[in-house]
Amino acid sequence: MASGVSDRFSYVLTHTAVIRHTGDGRTLTKSSANERASGLDRLADRPSEEAVSCDHCAARLRVTLRSAAEVERRRRPYRPLWKVSALLTVLSGWGLVEVVRGGDGLGGGEFLAMAGSAAATVLFGWGTLWSLLLTRSFDTPEIARTDGPEPRGVRHGWGSRRGGRRSVRPE
């Protein structure tokens, strides 16, 4: 299997529904998960698929997991990008330190240099984190409903189940 790509993906199907619309444009949602956890084996050269149904609304869904080759192909452009962005972050941070250390506080040029180097440091730092995230992503499944469109306010997705079953509080 390709480096950094998992051989198996375990998931729990989730059902999210809008319960109520509040007056200020927000919505209240409720998410539920299927009782049984599922999993797909990642194949090297083609996607793997599984047909599942939602325990809450009986919707028929198709879960598709990308192949290892497809995940690697999508991740490849971001591998050198984070290194370049990290170098630019360090250089702009060093420039910010030099502007702050060398300034005497007089004049607008120093303020513009400080603001510009601070903005560049933040921008390149964000770019570094974003490209690092993209070098580790694209390995999650896609979920599509096969028996028609999703009803308004309902969405299906996936989640990971941590631990065992929820404990029920005794009455």
Image: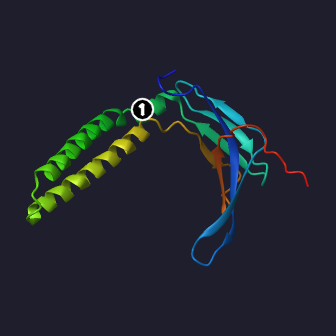
Q: Name the residue rendered at 79%, 48% in the picture.
A: 55
Task: Give left or right: position of 95 versus 145.
Answer: left
**Which residue extends farthest top?**
1
**Observer-nearest residue: 168 or 36?**
168
Visual colour scheme: rainbow
Asked which secondary structure carries label 1, the reply is helix
Measured as percent of width and height from the top left, residue 34 is found at 76, 45
Task: Give left or right: position of 14 versus 43.
Answer: right
* Amino acid type of the residue tagged 1 in the rendering: Arg
**Image quadrant containing the C terminus:** bottom right
Note whether 93 is above or below 50 in the view shown. below
**Observer-nearest residue: 150 or 27?**
27
Query: Can the viewer see residue 129 in this picture?
Result: yes
Note whether 127 is above or below 83 in the view shown. below
Q: Name the residue rendered at 42%, 32% in the picture.
A: 73
Measured as percent of width and height from the top left, residue 138 is found at 49, 38
**Which residue extends farthest bottom?**
23
Residue to which mark 1 is pinned: 73
**Observer-nearest residue: 61 or 133?**
133
Measured as percent of width and height from the top left, residue 67 is found at 53, 30
- Total count of labels: 1
Query: Can the viewer see residue 152 in this picture?
Result: no
Q: Name the residue rendered at 48%, 38% in the picture.
A: 137
Q: Residues within 10 Å of mark 1 (few under 14, many from 20)?
A: few
Asked which quadrant contains residue 75, the reply is top left
**Observer-nearest residue: 170 or 106?**
106
Note whether 57 is above or below 12 in the view shown. below
